[in-house]
Structures are given as C-alpha cells and as structure tokens.
Amino acid sequence: PGSETGPASTTAASQAAQGDDAQKRIAFFGFARANAFAVATWNGIEEYAKANNATAEFFDPNFDAQTQVQQIQDAVTSKRFDVFIVQANDGASVVPALRQAVAAGITVVAEFTPVGTAYDTADSQVPGVVTLVDVPTDNGKKLGELGVEACRSKNLDPCKVAYLEGMKSLPLDNARTEAAVKALEAADGVELVSRVEGGYTREGGRKAMQDVLQAQPDVNVVIGSSQAIAGAESVVKGKGVLLIGNGGSRQAVKAVQDGRWFATYYLPEKSAGAKAAELGLAKARGQQVEESNSETVLAPNDGKGTKEALAGVAGEYDE
Amino acid sequence: MRIDLEGFGKSYGGVPVLQDVSFTLHGGRVHGLLGENGAGKSTLLKAVCGAVAPDTGRILLDGRPITVGSPRDALRHGFTLISQELALVPAMTVLDNVYLGRWRNRLGWRDRRADRRRFAELSERTGFELDPSALVRDLPIAAQQQVEVLRALASGASVIGMDEPTALLTQNETERLMEVIRRLAADGAAVVLISHFLEEVLSVCDDVTVLRDGRHIKTGPAAEQTPQSLVGDMVGRPVELLYPEPRPVREDAPVLLSARGLRRGSAVRDVSLDIRAGEIVGIAGLVGSGRSETLRAIFGADAPDAGVVEVAGRPVPAGSPARAMKAGLAMVPESRKDQGLVLGRSVRENVALASLGSRQRAGFVRGGAEREAAGAMLGGLDVRGSDLGGPVWTLSGGNQQKVLFGKWLMDRPKVLMVDEPTRGVDVGAKGQIHQLLVELAAEGMAVLVVSSEVEEVLGLAHRVLVMRHGRFVGEFERGRATPEQVVALAFADTPDTELPEENR
Amino acid sequence: MTATTADVKADVKAAPGRSARLRDLGIVLGVVLIIVVLSISTSTFLTTGNLVNLLDQAAVVGLLATAATLVIISGSFDLSITAVLALSAIVAVAVTNVAGVGPGMIAGVLAGAVLGTINGIVVVRIKVHSFIATLALSIIYRGLAVILTAGAIVYPAEDRLTAFQALSWPTVLGGVTAASLLFLAVVAVCWIVLARTTFGRRVYAIGGNEEAARLSGIRVGQIKVAVFAISGVCAALGGLILASRGGSAQASLATGMEMTAIAAAVVGGTSVMGGEGAIWRGLIGVLLITLIGNGFNLLGWDTIYQQVVQGALILGAVSLDRLLRGRRS
Amino acid sequence: MTATTADVKADVKAAPGRSARLRDLGIVLGVVLIIVVLSISTSTFLTTGNLVNLLDQAAVVGLLATAATLVIISGSFDLSITAVLALSAIVAVAVTNVAGVGPGMIAGVLAGAVLGTINGIVVVRIKVHSFIATLALSIIYRGLAVILTAGAIVYPAEDRLTAFQALSWPTVLGGVTAASLLFLAVVAVCWIVLARTTFGRRVYAIGGNEEAARLSGIRVGQIKVAVFAISGVCAALGGLILASRGGSAQASLATGMEMTAIAAAVVGGTSVMGGEGAIWRGLIGVLLITLIGNGFNLLGWDTIYQQVVQGALILGAVSLDRLLRGRRS
Ligand SMILES: Nc1ncnc2c1ncn2[C@@H]1O[C@H](COP(=O)(O)OP(=O)(O)OP(=O)(O)O)[C@@H](O)[C@H]1O
Ligand SMILES: Nc1ncnc2c1ncn2[C@@H]1O[C@H](COP(=O)(O)OP(=O)(O)OP(=O)(O)O)[C@@H](O)[C@H]1O
Ligand SMILES: [Mg+2]
Ligand SMILES: [Mg+2]
C-alpha cells in the first residue's frame, strides 16, 4: 500500500502477454555489495540470467534495513523489473514493500532470509512471494545436532560446548540460537558452558574465543558463524577443540576437508542464487513453480557439512 | 533602598580571593569598586549577582536577608550584572541579545515588534546607536560592550553591577554611558561601577570602596578622594600616574613599517603609513572607525583587498600572520577572549605560544627554558594570582591582558602593533606597560598603538594619526594636540587639511 | 553626532538583507539541481507515485532529523534517538497487546517522552557531555529492548494488526500515507515552535552561548530537558511508523539511522557547534540524502559506484553551500 | 546552593595543584574499580594469558582511539578512520600480491597517510565542518573499497600468507603479539609528540581557540592536515593488524568501530569541544570498554543483560570522573 500501482501492473501484465521469450529483468536486493556471501548469490543470479535471456541488477543497501525497503519501493516505481530476488537484511520491514511489488505484478523471490516475522518455516508469509530460504530454526537445530555429533565422535562425556551467538539484538539470530541450544540440551552428556556474542567477523570471533578460553579452558566444542570460527581457530590452535562453523565459504569447506574444523553448515550460495533466479524467471514466464522452498535441498546432507558430506565440494565464495 | 553585603568570602583551590568583605550600597547612588588586578572585584560582583557561589556572605535587602543562588534568583530580586568578559550569544541579533530570555511574548509567541519598540526607546535613552538586526558576532568588540550595557538596562534591575563597562569605549561613548548611569541613579537604582579609570570613577560615583588582595580596605564618599589617595589605598604604595616621555626618534632611523594603499571592504578604505625605528605612532578614532581592521590588515589577520606592507624595506606577503611574524611583525589583538588567549590552556602555554620556535630542540619544547622565559616575562609584567600551570581563564581580566601582552614580547619583534594594550589593566600595571612600550621603542622597535583612550595615545606616541571611516584624516606631532582636538577631528565630517599629502 | 552614527551604520558590513538570505540557500540550490537532473533523465521521477513514495521514505528519517536538528541547535547531541525509537515501538506493541491499539500508540509516545526526559536529566545533572551520555544511554535502551523482547520479534495480536498498521495506510490525499502526514505535521509544529516562540529563542540562546543564557536568567536545565523530551517524542513517532509498516517491532529497529539523521541535519546547514540552524535545513538534508538514493534506484546505474557518487554528491552540496555563504566575518 | 551547568566552568576547575591532578584521575579510579572487582570475582582475569589477550583485543580499537583523541583535541572529528582502515588494508593486500609483503605493508601505511591528508585538505580548504566532511569522505572510501575488491574478500597469495600474518604472531615477551607491540609503540610516539613537542602545543592551541592560534602565527591549515594524516596512518596500521590476523581484507572491515573509538576517546575525558585531553585518556577509555566486554565473558553472565550493564558502567565511570572533577575543594 502507499503508492500508485495501477500503471505498473498494466505494464507488467502486458509484458507477460508478450510471451515467455521476452527478455526479463531481475533486481537483486542483497545484504550489501561489501559482503562476499551476497556477492556469491549475485554471481549465481547474474550467470543464470545471462544464460536465460535476462538481465540482472544489484541494489546495494550496505546492510541497512530501511535503505533496502526504499530500494524495493523505488524499484517498483521505476518499472524496470519483472523479477525481484530479495535477500532481506530485516525480514519484517520489507514486507509492505514486497506487498507493493506483488501488487504491481512483479515476481518476488525471498532468498535466504525468511520474509515476515516467523523464523521457523519456509512457507511464504507474504501472499504471492516465492521462497527459497534457509529456515533459521532449522539451521540452529542442525548446528546443535552437529555439536552433539562432534561430542559423540570423541566419546566425550561430559562434553563442554560453547556457542558463539550472532547479534543479541537480531531476532533471527536469537531464533537460531534458541533452536541450537535446544538441540544441544536435549542430548545427554552435552553441556552448554558458554554463550557469548561472536558476531560475524573474525575479530569478534577471536575476541570471544579468547574470553571463552579464559573462563572455560577445557571447552571441547565451539559453534559459531564461519567468520567467527575462523577467528576463533587462531586462538584454539593445537588445543584439540572441535570447531563447527555456520556458513559454506571455500575457506570453511576447506577447513572441514583438512580436518581443522569438525563441520560447517554448508549451503551452496551461488547455486542458491541461480536457483532463485530460476524460480523467479520461471514464474515470471508463466510457469508453475513450487512456492515454498528450503535452501538445504541444494546442499549435501541437508546442509550438515561434515567431512564425509563435503567430500568433493568446493564452496562457492571466499570469506 | 539599602543593600548590605555582609562577610563575603571565596577561595579557589584553597587560595582566598575574597575575605570577609562587607559594605553597604544605597539606592540612588553610584558606588565605585576599585582595586588592583586580581583584587577580587569581579568575583565579589559575580557573587552578589548569583553568577558564582560565594563560600560565605549574605545580602540584606532593606534589612531582610535574601538568597541568591543563581543569576535567575538575582534577577528576581532586581540584581543584574554586566560582566567583564562579554557574555553574548554571537549568532543572535543585537535585539535578541538585549532582551535575552526576556523577550516580549503573547502566550509564548515571540512579539518581535514590541521588542523593537522597546529597543528604540532604549536607544533613545542611552544614545547608543546599534542596528537591532545586526548579528552580534559581526560587531566590533566595543559595540558588543554596548550591547551588554543595553541588556543590563533592559532588565529593569534596580541593582546594577557594571564590571569595567568602559574599558573599550571611546571618550564619547564613555560620556554617554556616564550620563546613563547618573540617570539610573537619579531614578533610584543602586549602581556598582568597577573601573580602572580613576577620573571617571571620581566624576560619576557618590561612594567608593577599595579592595586589596581580596580584603576590604575602605568605603567612603567619593568627594573625599583624589586619584592619588585611591591609588595609595589600592596598591599600598605611591604610584607615578604620569606618562613616561618617549625618547626622540633618531634622525637617521630607518623606516621599519611601511604600508601603502591598504584597503579592505568598507572598514579600511585607503591607509598608508610609515613608522621608523624607535618611533611610537598612535591611532585615535571612534568605535568602528577601522583602527583594529587596519592593524589586522597589516598583520595579515585578514587579507587586504589592495595595498602592500613592508617591514624594513622588504614586502610582507599578505594574509598570513605566520609570514608577518617571520618578517618581524607582532600584533596584540583587541579581544583577548576571541583572538588572544587559548583560555583552557595554562598560563605558561599561552605566553609561550607565539614564540614556540625559539625554544625548541628538534621539535621538542625545552621545558626548562620555557619555564624560565615565561616566569621572567610574567614576573616583569606583575601577573598575579595563579601558578603558571593553571588555565589562563582563572586569571582576573587584567592579569589575562598582561599574559596576552607578554606573549608578544617573548620574541622581540621589529614592529609591535598593540590594540587596546591596557584594556582592563590597573593603574599601576598600566604605568608599567607604558614604560615598557617606551623602552622598547628606545631600543629601536617601531610601535603602533591603538587605544580608545585618547590620553593614552597622546601620552605615549611621537605622532598621532586620527582615523575616520577607514581613512586617516589628520596627523598631530607630539604635544601639538589636546584630546578635544583629536575627538573633534574624529567626528568632523569634512576632510581635514592638516593631513599630509602622502597619507591621503 | 547623529550624522556620524548614521555613517557608522552605513559602514556596517553587509547588513543581513536579501543577498545574505539568498546566499543562505546554497544547499537548496544543490537539491534543486538534483531534482532537475532527475526529472529530465528519468520518466519515473516526476510521477505522483514516486513523489508519494519519496515522502513516505523520508518520514522516519525526517522525524529523526527534526529531533537531531533541534538538539544540535540547543548545543547538544542525541545519539540515542534510534534506541529510543526501538524501545518505544516495542512498548507500543506490548501495550497494544494488553490494552488495544489506541493505548498502545499513546504508551509508545509516552515512552519516548520519558526516555527523552531521562536523557535530558542525565545530561543536565551529571554534566557529562551529551555525546557520551546519550551514547551510553542508547546502549542501555537497546539492552532493555533486548530484555523486553527476549531478543525476539514482537507483533500485535492478529485481530489488532490491521488497526495497528493504520499509520502505513494511504490517505485520500493522492495516496500520501498517514505516516507522511504525521511527519509533516510534527515538522511544522517543531519548525514554528523553534522559529516563532520564546521557547525557540531560548533554545538558540543556550546553543549559542550557554553561559550568557544562564546569566540572563534562562533556566538552562529545564530547556535542555524539554529539548531532549521533544527529541524522544519525535523518535517514538518514528518508531510507531516503522512498527506500523512492518506490523512488528524488534530491538534492532533502525540501528545506525541516528548517524543518517545527524548527517542530514548537518548537511542542511545546522552548525555542529550549536546555536545556528533551522528545522527546514534538516529537511533539506533529508531530502538530499533520500533523493540521491531514489535517483540511483530509478536511474539504474551500476550500484557498485553508488557509494562513491553518494559521498561525492553530499560533499559537493555542502561545499556549494559553504562557498555561497562565503567567509564568515 | 544549586549549581547549574555553567557553574562548572566558573567554579569547578579551580586552581590546579596537586589535588586537581588527583581529581583528574577519576576515570582511572573507575577502571581500577572494575579491575579489582574482576580480579576478585574470577580466577581467570589476573592471568598472563588473559592480560595478553586483553592487550591484543585492545590493539586495533586502541590505535583508532589514539587517532580519534588526537583529532578531537585539535578541534575536529574524523569519522572516516574505519573506512581508511579498510581501504588501506585492501591496498596492502593488493600490493603484497604484486610486490611482496614488505612493499605491501608500506603501501598500506602510505595509503592511510594519503587518505588522511585528503581528509585534512578537504576540511581545511572547503571549510566544511570536519564532522560532515569526513562522513562524506568515509562513504567515498568505502565505495572505493567495494570497487577495488568488487565486493569480494581479497587475500595475499598462499606463499606470502605466512609472512603477511607476521603481525598476529606472539613474540618472546610472554606471548604478547607483534600487533600489541606495534600498538604500544605508536601510542607512545603519539603521546610524546602531543605532550612534549611544539607540534603538540600547536595542536592543543588550535583545538582550544583556532583564531587565537592563527593570530599567534600558527599555520592552522598545515597542522590540521598533519593531524588528519597521522590519524590516517594510525587507522592504516589498525587495518594492517586486522588484515594480518584474518589473512585477508574486505570492504566492510571494522564497520562502525569509529564510534567505539570516538566513545573511548571521550569516555577517557578528552573534551568533545577540543583543546583538552590526552592520549592516555583515550587508552583508559579503550581499557574501560575492553574490560567490560572481557569481564562479561569471563563471568559468564547471561548475555541478555550485557548491553544494559555495559551502558550503565560507561555512564557510571564518566559520572564518577565528572563528580570528582566537579567537587569543589
Ligand atoms: N574560577 C577561578 N578559579 C581560580 N581562581 C580564580 C577564579 N576566578 C578568579 N580567580 C582568582 O581570583 C582572583 C580575583 O579575581 P577577580 O577576577 O575577582 O579580580 P578583579 O579584581 O576583577 O581583577 P581585574 O581588575 O583584573 O579584573 C584572581 O587572583 C583570580 O586569579
Ligand atoms: N555600531 C556598529 N554596528 C555595526 N557595525 C559596526 C559598528 N561600529 C563599527 N562597525 C563595523 O566595524 C568595523 C570597524 O571595526 P574596527 O574594529 O576596525 O573599529 P575600531 O576603530 O577598532 O573600533 P573598536 O573600538 O570597536 O575596536 C567596520 O566594518 C564597521 O562597519
Ligand atoms: Mg575583573
Ligand atoms: Mg578596535
């Protein structure tokens, strides 16, 4: 609501009427240009678009949720796009803008972040929006399960686990953390001894790990974002701590394959970008598509990237 | 109305600056408050008007004790203060400043028209001509002083403390202000006047009080005092009140400062002058005649629109004080607060600031040398009240002025330009500064003096230039002019024939 | 004597008259330039839809910039506005769930006023510089927001959601949203209060020279607290708009936006040193920043250059402003 | 008698003697309190390992706080330090790949110096307030960083990686990292320069009263540019440390950390108005902020309360500082 949507929908409709072969235009609303993960998604989208008679543009909100909302609004206004792929910085605030987009006849794909306020489902929370998301609670649950596996792999009992949280003020992070904690606590002999903010930088992870080690020198397993774990790795080198990352960068995958990390939660992000583009273009070209998709189907072992599961996998972005 | 001040005391960091000061003010009378720099005059007045909290002391208003915890309280009781360091809002207009916090309003809505009307009446009453819509920061400092005065008058207070309101006013404005003060007293107000101009005090005050080192020395009717007796009470020793006689300029003395055709906006229209080694030249003129602007243009504080400046025959690049200093120029600016001192830094740092380069080794400050040089300079100027490590704003106004003056003598310049050099300085120290200027000239320095005190200019200079609307309109050799003549020329509307050809 | 005084007046430097006023409008010129360029180079910029969107986009940051402008003019900084925004929005949702949408909205605004008042009292009483005081308080407020929500997203119950989202509805005025109208109304009030009332004059006086204001009997503390309270209310209204748009609130709402708001205030020409500026200047700043973003989105340039161009345009606009206003005497 | 804000100036600072110097140490007292509490309540705080870690954690933000302190004392703000940090780190990696680790490091530092100089020149020439000038420039620098890296992470080639990470190695001094030593060395130099040289004096003078400084023959422009250049170099060194630790660099490096650095500078007691402060004060600020985070992690309290406690402790420390400085003798 809030804008004049009439003309836009006519345009989109008339273009749709031109048939499936017409060139389609994709707008990608990523986290930020200065973010390797978002750039990987973008590369997947761009490649797929090129190969399938479509163009693509990257809108860069530089991690700012409100800027992203404005970009979506403006992109609707500009009438230059048929397909939106939205990697939301904040799933809740983009909802009204996406409603506008849907009303304007634009095909919307929510990529990675669920759009709306529920973090435990891949189902679309905005009518008309196609999803290809990584369900946060599912993600957390799998991280917890990987933690338990790590404990079991060395028959540790009790097994001391530290969880490096994302940002305490982000609901999505908290939903993931809750799920992970639940999975860990459900297992016998697994003891969650520390929960600190590790964030999404090596620096944050390094700092958090230093402090955790001071308080819990005999920690066995550490779980956190792949960046934080990369930072933590330099601190726990040689201490036999099992590391579990959340993220499928080349470095993370290699760390698992080299046996430096126990596992990482792996999603092929570039492929996910391509898949999102595929879903979007297909729908825009009038084909029937599955509305609700989880990204984990693209990954080996549903994302639980242990050494076996990641054999032969390369990772799709640098971090 | 009768105001008894009882037992005022105040100390800073354990050092008493006021001790058990008591005396009485009366409605309808003007009360002079005298004392050396740092004697505690400002502190006392501030304490009475709620601007600082005294350690001890109370005020009885017609016998009843009143509490004055803040300037606001003081105002409610009808007490107001014109503070020595101007307290104006630079980005606001004259009108806004005059009625600061007391604007006319209807249900909170500002009624500017009513204020303008009030302002017109006030202007009429005082004879101060100020443009009510000018921004205060664009005014010369003397005009700002007038704004302060107007504000105190506008408050309608019945007890008005004036802390050196005339330090920057020329003779004319001073006379008008004295008129205003007399009229205020005639209307029943009690006025307290702090001033270092003894004649002025004696001419307008009914009573005087003298403070020395924070203590009350005496209170009595002004009629029983002479300048000499007052000085004796203030200083505790006799002081020479005469101007020292400058040594004649040597015939063959070279021209050290030469300015040709200086122009800057409408303030400096066409200024040329030559000053020889050993010569003291004075500039007299009215407020806003462009004297300060002329000095600033020569020094490069403002870039002149046209004109050249030479020091000892070498041209000085325009618009850069740093280059001017390299060439041997120095300028003591008129506003110590805005242009002169870094108030938050220590006394020592301030004195050393303009001559850092001459006491360094590989870029490091030579602490010992600096302490020594600064100590000697400040001792020579008789700066009192604080150790060299304390911030300069804790000094009394007069002592700050001495610090400012000293700063420019640390490196002996070839040409010294001083703008209001004795602003707020007590009689004793004033004599010392005059003596110093004469000695510096005798040693071969060229000195240019701007002062709002015509006597000072006439008393010090070999030659006096009179300025009007950015031009020199007259020139007097030493001893050839009376103050009245100079003032008349500063006012006259026709160009004067006495002006030498090359100065046109 | 009268002749002389008249002359002196004639001497007075460039009495602030028409030319001075024109020179003050440098930043407006910058904005107008951008508008003209966008109108010519896109067909979509000058459409009702886009203009309505622009206004809607400007609403929240505009409210915050109004708050920032007010506080900066009074000589302080308020770095807590977005934290107040988030906490107020959360309070509004919580109270809505307990007592209904009306009480919820009122509670949100009250929360903003209370938090703002706390800011003011801390600044005035503890005498810590507002920069650091509001920074510390903003950390506390965000922390409270996390505690209140247990780190999760909060939203009004399903049956109240529609009413709760009222602020994001388009109104009869060509689709202009209620949020935009609220924004315009608040700005108008603040503008008038600052420019026309004695309270406004006091705010300028305190920002221009606190000591002079105090000596003139102005109650510096009270005025400061009032300014921070107004700032808090503006922030809370911004929070209501965001919560209403998203139909939810969370602790991280509007993170970082305080810097955008302060930047907008300053870009518009309000002096960081206090005592100078105007609400309309803050709005011009917001307009400039919003326009740059909007233009980029409409033009479809490669966004990889967006930041560089954005920074350069901001720098250019303030330089132009500076240049036209010229040397300060 | 109620003392209002301005009383502080009139009354408070009083004659600075020994007692005043002691009173100036209020913030130190705050930090000492926290250290004592942590030493008693945890067995891990006062271990070599933890202290080494603390120093290591403080290195980058400490370098930035040093830069911030210097710039603030000179009367300006530098909001671009983290953008300069990121861009310098990227340059260092890029040059390392072309010409080796040594040249890469030098290029990084040079980049910092050049960017800092640009900041200074813009501030001095355009006369826009440094707050907004460096904000706009920081957007530009981050944009350049995105363009240079195409938004990706950049790494030194595998064979140069180990040498590139030299700064993160522990040294013989009980495991203190090379980064910590670099940090301490830079701080020592800045401290001495500011406290003991004529340059330092000029910096204080400019910050305290720019016009008085100019009229005292100080080349204000040059000094300002030099200050910004030093700030740029400190930022670049911070960038090298981060890049060295991570073995990579990216455009978003250290985003937002400039506010932490400025907060640290101000928390330590450096006046936002310029002309007052000291490098050691910036360090105390960094120590305070680092300690609070460290303490929380060691104590193992529920992180949901972390922010509230953090904000409250900062506010408490600066209040204590203010209170001690403010009490009349
Ligand atoms: N805030 C302060 N802190 C420390 N010392 C102060 C402070 N204010 C004033 N003093 C000291 O108190 C003494 C009296 O100062 P005061 O300003 O009252 O002198 P004064 O008589 O007005 O002198 P002048 O004629 O120079 O203006 C001085 O020695 C001054 O240094
Ligand atoms: N009453 C006034 N209102 C506004 N501007 C004034 C007034 N008086 C002077 N000016 C301006 O001040 C400038 C000259 O000031 P300058 O400081 O050089 O004068 P001055 O002779 O040194 O007087 P002062 O005694 O004030 O220092 C001129 O540009 C003049 O227009
Ligand atoms: Mg005095
Ligand atoms: Mg003058």
Image (cartoon, coloured by chain):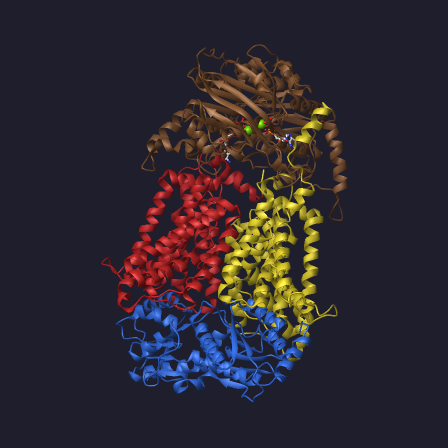
Chain colours: A blue, B brown, C yellow, D red
Left or right, residue A133 beside residue C269: left
In the orientation shown, which residue stands out farthest toward the left? D172
Q: Is residue A47 above or below residue B120?
A: below
Quadrant for ligand 4? top right
Q: Please provide percent x and percent y for residue B403.
A: 46, 28
Q: Quadrant of the N terminus of chain B?
A: top right
Q: Please provide percent x and percent y for residue C246.
A: 60, 73
Q: Please provide percent x and percent y for residue D142.
A: 46, 60
Near-viewer residue (B420 or A112): A112
Q: Is residue A63 above or below residue A188?
A: above
Near-viewer residue (D20 or C310): C310
Q: Is residue D136 above or below residue C144?
A: above
Is residue B398 at all visible to an observer of this figure? yes
In the orientation shown, which residue stands out farthest toward the bottom? A288
Which residue is depicted at the point 43% across and 82% down?
A: A141
Q: Quadrant of the C terminus of chain B?
A: top right
Q: Please provide percent x and percent y for residue D214.
A: 48, 36
